[in-house]
Amino acid sequence: MVDYAQEWDTDSLLRLIHDMSSCATAPVLILLLARSAGMWWQMLVSRVFRNFDMVPEALRLEPLVSRPSDRAPLFSEAVRQFAAALEVPVAPLACPPSGLQDNSAYDQVLTLHMSALAHVLAAVQDSTAPDDPDKLSAYLLARECDHWARLHERGLLRADPNAMAQIMYIAALTGPLSHADGTAALEAAPVELWEHPGRLVKDHSVCYAPSRPDSVLEPLYPDRLNEDFLALMAPGHDCAFPADP
């Protein structure tokens, strides 16, 4: 299975298909996940047919539910699972968002899950989760900032929330890097804190453990949260999230 297949170059995908098909002792299904089936797909289909005499098939990923009325059970199950993971009683949790039935944004399972998580977290804090799906990222990211502040106050981070937000902005743009490249990135885009880049990299790793032992500057996941963080950090929006000029 290849994730973000549209970001791979065609030769690499062809080499993968060749390696998988030439050494297989049983039928192999190669699944390419992509956001769109554009020109990259047309080029790949043509070359796969020419090189391997195979005809790849494009399958559109449909919404998880076919009717708006099916969203509520999915939301309730997501709430139950998040509550269990966070050891929160399910009983006091708020009702589903008012637009769950009518807003097409909830056709996306990620939006539905983000809303369920926000409702569980709101129950923990005795606050109210946003009804508007467009405000979910700002709500969840505000909790990230609060987490940085608490670690800073306890002396576990040298970087304050302002500096951590700037480090996260750089991480969102670069993705995971080697230690040398990560510190070089922080030097090239100076963070507003008189700390050595190596110290800032370590602070970042306290909050976001690297996916590989030899990398630093792990971005936020899922990707949508990372993308929304970039947008919210940039001035010009009216969301309740502080931009950074």
Image (cartoon, rainbow, N blue to C red):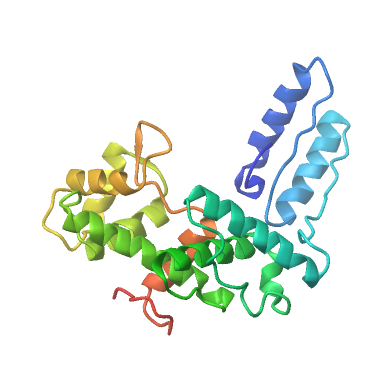
Q: Please identify the residue farthest to the left as the structure is shown.
A: 194
Q: Please identify the residue farthest to the front as the structure is shown.
A: 91
Q: Is residue 50 left or right of residue 133?
A: right
Quadrant in the picture for residue 180: top left
The residue lying toward the viewer, choosing from 148 and 183, is 148
Residue found at x 21% / y 59%:
190
Query: Can you say whether 237 is above or below 29 in the image?
Result: below
Residue 138 locus on image (x, y percent): 44, 71
Query: Can you say whether 81 is above or below 228 in the image?
Result: above
The residue lying toward the viewer, choosing from 97 and 169, is 97
The C terminus, quarter of image: bottom left
- Number of labels in the image equals 0
The N terminus, quarter of image: top right
Quadrant in the picture for residue 182: top left
Residue 194 locus on image (x, y percent): 11, 57
Q: Is residue 177 left or right of residue 228?
A: left
Residue found at x 83% / y 50%:
59
Q: Is residue 204 left or right of residue 1?
A: left
Residue found at x 66% / y 39%:
2
The residue lying toward the viewer, choosing from 186 and 149, is 149
Residue 80 locus on image (x, y percent): 60, 55
